[in-house]
Image: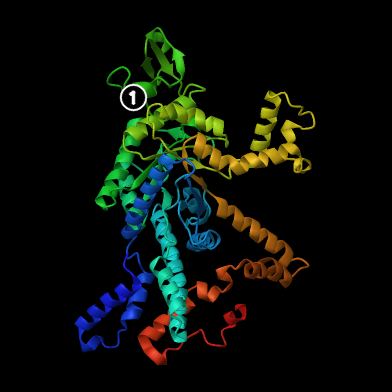
Amino acid sequence: MIHYKELVKQQQEIIDAGGSKWGAINAEHAARMSLQNRFKTGLDIAKYNAAIMREDMAAYDADSEKYTQSLGVWHGFIAQQKMISIKKHFNGETKRRYLYLSGWMIAALRSQFGPLPDQSIHEKTSVPDLIEELYTFLKQADARELRHLFTDLDDARAEGNEVKEKAVLDKIDNFQTHVVPIIADIDAGFGNEEATYLLAKKMIEAGACCLQIENQVSDVKQCGHQDGKVTVPHEDFQAKINALRYAFLEMGVEDGVIVARTDSLGAGLTQKIPVSSQPGDLADQYISFIDGEEITSIDDIAPGDIAIRQGDRTIKAARLPNGLFQFKPDTGADRVVLDCVTALQNGADLLWIETEKPHVGQIASMVDRIKSIVPDAKLVYNNSPSFNWTLNFRQQVFDAWTDDGKDVTAYDRANLMDASYDDSDLSTEADKRIQAFQRDAAKGAGVFHHLITLPTYHTAALSTDTLSKDYFGEQGMLAYVRDVQRQEIRSGLACVKHQDMAGSNIGDDHKEYFSGGQALKASGEDNTMNQFG
């Protein structure tokens, strides 16, 4: 870490070396601008955050209470406000708090084709573009907060208050950046392994230190919480994991993090049958899950049928009219375990198991099997808005109470979302379990990182609905003043001064640096932002 005064000294030496023609350049101003742009490139960001993630993974291995969290964001401003809020509410600390970049939200909100489903049919370039946008806004948050500290420093000096000056300098020297790790969704790679590698490089170059890839077939990829998912054999997925690692190494991010996601729990189809070279190898294990009808004669084979050997049996593989092969029913958990162990043994750092409900016991049942082979296995878990959390946990409590012999006759299990249950004992217990879910899953199911994929999609919709209902109704302007602006002021939200948030004061500083006393600045007494104190 270079201290503020030391950086000013370094800049002065550079300016002095430039001679008289650099006489108008102020070393302190140059130092401030340098600190406000600490990360010069996306690769600087990727390297910095990869090291942070590795430290956090080691900390979690030592203490499962030190799990990490993130919220999914779809715009730089949303990411910026999230991190400003975290610093405001948690004593300036961002530790173990990341961002998640969701392919679902890029498809739904950022594609030039308009809103799209989560099927990898949006532009692949939109993924690195959004990573760059997110970090541009986070860097601007750094610049803004530091600018306020520099103003405090100038004020302390003008007052001759050395104690205050020292305190401000200490804050500058120990400034904690808003730039945090992003777990970035590369879907199923947007093509073959070469396409995956090329896109990964662009994402890393934009700042990604962690890439999440899933084992679905790229050209028929589906949202993990919808039907029709088709997985690939392990060697195909391994090739893409290798592609990610090569991309990290080529870009100089040697400790980049790879999250291997398996959709096998809810995927009943595969596109191709791998070639097994010997009994018991990985391909043979994959083949063992293919569903089919046992045959004993060549006459059992019709044109277009596929016969495969499974141990001592030969089967006619169950094949749909579209050519896809079916897995045996109730094999999803076994396939998940094989997927995860194989991924961890072949280059992945973290796992993602896509589930159909938030249930600690279900997750733990698979993770325990994985950990029996790879003891330090760790998960990234999707606390998805696709789950009806209220209904799921009320049903979990209902079932637990039933198993314990508790009287549940006052409740209708099929109708537990009814608002009449909101103040019931069952609802209270369910909410307690929801509140403890992340902690319990971190401790009991190996979850290192908890994320919500689409939260800001839903918060934007909800807040807009609330404002629209009242503003266009009888409340008129009061709806905005009472429910938005007044709440911003009362909560101390920085963005109530939206000119400052957008960089107006930073621009004024630069104008003064560049033009001196002739600078035309926007922050004079007639600026209405002064009304906010």
Q: Secondary structure at mark 1?
A: helix
Mark 1 Cα-neighbour bin, 10 Å: few <14, some 14–19, many ≥20: some
* Residue 65 on image: x %, y %: 49, 43
Amino acid marked by disc 1? Ala
Residue furthest top in the image: 296
At x 46%, y 28%, the residue is 368
On-image quarter of the C terminus: bottom right
Image colouring: rainbow
Q: Which residue is mark 1?
A: 283
* Residue 193 on image: x %, y %: 31, 41
Tell me: residue 161, above or below residue 75: below
Tell me: residue 215, above or below residue 454: above
At x 42%, y 89%, the residue is 519
At x 40%, y 85%, the residue is 512
Is 250 or 320 nearer to us in this picture?
A: 250
* Residue 50 on image: x %, y %: 35, 51
Tell me: residue 358, above or below residue 525: above
Say if residue 187 shows up in the picture: yes
On-image quarter of the N terminus: bottom left
Is 142 or 42 nearer to us in this picture?
A: 142
* Residue 24 on image: x %, y %: 30, 88
Question: Which quadrant holds residue 498?
Answer: bottom right
